[in-house]
Image: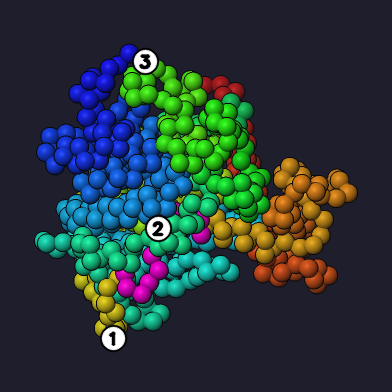
Amino acid sequence: MVTAECIKTEYPLHWCVWYNDYKNLRDLLSRKEHDKEKKDNRGRTPLMLAVTLGHLESTRTLLNSEANVNCENLKGWTVVQEAVATGDPELLQMVLESRDFQRYTSRMAGIPELLQRLKEAPDFYVEMKWEFTSWVPLVSRMCPSDTYKVYKQGSSVRIDTTLLGFDHTSWQRGNRSYVFQGHNDGATMMEIDHDTQQVYCEQMRTTEDSLGMLLPNEESVSQRLTTPIVTTYVDTEKISFERNKAGMWGWRSDKTEMINGYECKVFGASNVELITKTRTEHLTETDKARSKNNKHPLQNFLGIAEVGESQATALLPNNEEFRNSSNPCNITPEEYFDCSVDLEAQGRDIGRPKEVNVKVQKFKANLWLCENYPLSLPEQILPIVDLMAISSSHFAKLKDFIQMQLPSGFPVKIEIPLFHVLNARITFGNIFAMDSEVAHVSKVQEEDRLTCVLDECLFKCPSGYSQIGNGIDGRRQFSMEEEDDLLQFAIQQSLIDAGTEKDEVDIWEALKAQKPSRPETPSFLGEEERQLQRAIQASLELYQHDVNNLEPQNNSPDTDSEFHKALLLSQQDQERKRQREEEERLEEQRLLEEILALSLTEK
């Protein structure tokens, strides 16, 4: 058994936190001789331990000493998520403020370094086309697509986009440019709105004054405390890459495809697992019931594997007793800090007993890699992805994926999962504006290479545009978590808007393209499940029309014409795809016959 003296010697900060001895904790931190980021044998830093135990004073002391808020425990839960689980609004407010400040300052501090890395790389122009695909009817057509135009000259970067967001009824389109300019003493960011001819300019600052618009309000804190804690991530540990094959009847060869004029090797990434974890122990029974009723319809239907995890709540007489208890399982510090005691096997832990729901779905990601692409992934593209990942959850997921040990070559095309039913397909094209002309972009053919030349006016405020103060002022800033929520909500709205009052269909019938076999929908289905079913049924009926009958039918008043047109276009795409596959099959068969004929010819 580990003794108290051993713990004090090995984990002095943790020991003070355990007993919420914030005065001694403050003294130890002031000496700066102890590592405030040291993890105990359970994988918790002093701050993570203080938050999990719900010790307000110790948490405040550590945050005042700038302890890292952006860390995770062994289970992948962040300090903010553990603060939500305590149900303490004051604790959560404090942690959120520090989290936002640390995140902002680290991002701002990192931008000049990213721009400096780019300064040393050759200039370039490239287009990144983002497409969203899904096997659920209607979803692919309703989800957005966009082409990012990326300009890089020295330590300046410009990124053009047309997709602005979602306003709860439709996707917002516009024409905006984001310009980052590196300086010796920092960096400047401009957001240029070409529609209104206005420019928001921001100097990259790391002072408290720049965070006034980022502080969490009471509404956001309350919203976190009354909704489940959800985290979604791709498990990269089991992923393996292998070459896709082409050919028939045993004559198999490594598959290659032409992507935007470049020959690419095609790889499949197997064992890609998208994991969604949901915690609800901080919710009241009313909140849990409301959360269940308001559950995203895609989450209800499309979690392929679902596992429930919980800790031994039976140790407690009722839920009220642990609302203010930091250690309901009565774990002693000697037990906690003794690595030979397997608390997990005993179903015991500090903090509120966890109620965790886990959903796992396996995907197969795809890669198209080119050996002689004009761009360098680590030197030119990764800094751009890092720059965009600061504020975009989709770029953050792309960054996580391409930072793995990929096969050699430039990923001209990447297909990765975003959510349970949604994939993102990213394709690089029009490199150096060679495929189609781009204003202010030219190229010079040298002896051994092609050089891209960009006009400096691309990175300046356009003449005639008005400049409107700081980039934060007057504009809604979305966190990456909110961006994910908006996209999922948009998918949900697309499905609901497409629904009709016709017969409903469940997900398994949808996969088989069958009409419902039962006379009515079971009473246990919620309203949002019914909306999803109606959407799927409506889309299936449209898909089952004759492929050759490509004109909209006048006898279907229940169907929105725009959805109908989208589905007809989809039918055309599917037909063209089938024709291409048939042509490839016939070509392979012809080649095989030639090979067989040659093998039978006497030499």
Between 31 and 182, the one nearer to me in the picture: 31
Q: Position of residue 486 (x, y in %)?
A: 51, 59
Q: Pointer 2: what residue?
A: 479
- Res. 464 mark: 1
Choose top left, top right, bottom left or bottom right for residue 86.
Answer: top left
Residue 575 part of the magenta-drawn span: no
Distance CA(mark 3)–CA(mark 2): 40 Å
Q: Pointer 3: what residue?
A: 340
Mark 3 falls on what kind of element? loop
Above or below — where is 38 with respect to 130? above
The residue positioned farthest toward the right in the image shown: 519
Above or below — where is 587 with respect to 443? above
Q: Is residue 390 visible?
A: no
Q: Which quadrant does the N terminus fall into?
A: top left
Give the colouring mode of the picture.
Answer: rainbow
Choose top left, top right, bottom left or bottom right for residue 139.
Answer: bottom right
Which residue range is magenta in the image? 472-486
Which of the two discs, 2 and 1, sits closer to the camera?
A: 2
Name the residue rendered at 69%, 55% in the picture.
528
- Residue type indicated by callout 2: Ser
Residue 478 part of the magenta-drawn span: yes
Name the residue rendered at 49%, 51% in the picture.
225
Q: Position of residue 74 (x, y in %)?
A: 38, 31
Distance CA(mark 2)–CA(mark 1): 32 Å
Above or below — where is 188 with respect to 8? below
Between 445 and 198, the one nearer to me in the picture: 198
- Res. 49 mark: none
Which of the two discs, 3 and 2, sits closer to the camera?
A: 3
Q: Position of residue 103 (x, y in %)?
A: 29, 53
How packed mark 1 is, by other alpha carbons closer than 10 Å (few <14, some 14-19, many 20 or more), is: few
